Image (spheres, helix red, strand yellow):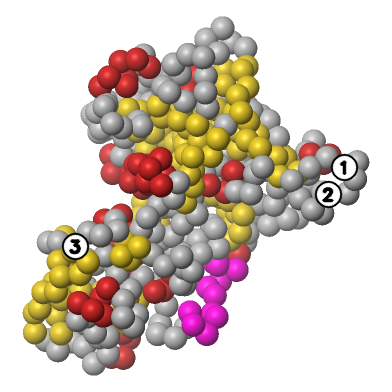
Amino acid sequence: MGWTQFGGVIRVAVLACALGTAGSAAARTPGKLWLESRNRAVSREHSNISEVARKAMPAVVSITTRQDSAEVAPGEEPQRGIGSGFIIHPDGYILTSAHVVDGASEVTISIRSANGYVEEFPATVVGEDERTDCALLKVDAPRKLPVLKLASASHVGIADWVVVIGNPFGLAHSVTVGVVSYLGRTDVTPNGRDGDFDYVQMDASINPGNSGGPVLDLHGDVVAVANAVNVSGQGIGFAIPIDIAKTVIPQLKAHGRMRRGWMGISVQDFSPEVAQAFNLNPRGRGVVVTDVVEDGPAARAGLRTGDVILNMDRLSVERAHTLRWQVAARGVGQHVRVQLRRLGRPMTVKVKLEDLPLVEAPPSTLASGATPGERAAGARSVLEELLSPVPRTPASRADRPAAGVDGLAAP
């Protein structure tokens, strides 16, 4: 079985999507980089799938990247990659996957004009965040651009229809359709490391070049961003909930990166094994603090190993990865009230979140499913071994079929 992220592989273009006029979109959402959807439940209304795709096309873009490398011999062309993206603001802001533009020295956006011809614009990478695999790009166009509305992944359910538009293998404006096959998938790590969120799993086809493209509900609103696929199987694709991107986008614009709140603890899901290891009631709930960083925010607030966190700011905490994202998204300098149980007694502590250290510790320093010491010993899960980004295809080989790299094709 091979897993991989898709984006930055061959070359080509992808375009598309218009919902509403650009001017009115900006007027209705002051201070935001995106147009908020009405968050209509799919079960209440049904749209024609072909109409959804047709309206979305003008705001979906193709992304071509160039990667300069010291390994390129004289006379050889530099590596080029492809991916997808979509316009979220009429002033030219575009959302895509971070791995699509990672390491690129040059990024070009292709947009389909109202007259049907393709326009190309150089793009600037405003900011990117590896852990959520989000990147914000900016192009300077001579006109306002069509945009897609951003909804919420919470408004789709298992077996709901979704539409994916992208640039697979350089085949611009390709549309695939499928259903959501699972929500809340946490046991996959397409970028080789733990993420801060649950994936949306679907059976709509995703291929190299689709990364960064929109996943739309039947109202034409974006509910997720196409991200990864199991290339050894069929109908198993993954997308990042758009809710994650909506949290990250403002920070990418303001800081060029996401300034995550950092508590300085390792936590684990509550389980009988963990309860036994820390002498806890096996019928408890919450997440268990398995390590506390010395002189970190949590340590200074009084948290200890073996504490069981039940709530943060009155929000119930049931899973380690949920706590990790809540802490990260809360931001630097914010105070959070943590309700916990220590030796059977309820307690409340107040923690001031700090910026994640520049030399980022392993994911377990915030929250992970590893047993104490497992990450430190260098252990990697089977999925971490299998999941990795797709290598970029050299321009000289872009049109050749491949075979065998992570289940793709060998040059």
How far is disc 3 from disc 2 in space, using C-alphas? 50 Å
Vertical comparison of 4 with 154: above or below: below
Which of 68 and 287 lies nearest the eye of the viewer? 68
Q: Amino acid at mark 2?
A: Val
Which of 5 and 401 lies nearest the eye of the viewer? 5
Category of crowding for the residue at label 3, using alpha-carbon neighbours closer than 10 angstroms: few (below 14), some (14–19), many (at least 20): some
Residue 243 locus on image (x, y percent): 33, 44
User: Label 3 belongs to which residue?
Assistant: 335
Q: Is residue 376 left or right of residue 311?
A: right
Q: Amino acid at mark 3?
A: His
User: Label 2 belongs to which residue?
Assistant: 72
Residue located farthest toward the left when viewing the structure as drawn: 346
Q: Is residue 288 left or right of residue 249?
A: left
Residue 350 locus on image (x, y percent): 15, 70
Asked whether the residues under the numbered discs 1 and 2 touch, taking CB atoms below 8 Å apart as contact, a structural biologist would say: yes
Q: Amino acid at mark 1?
A: Glu
User: Label 1 belongs to which residue?
Assistant: 76
Q: Which image quadrant is residue 144 in? A: top left
Q: Reading the chain from its start, which is encountered first: label 3 or label 1?
A: 1
Q: Reading the chain from its start, which is encountered first: label 3 or label 2?
A: 2
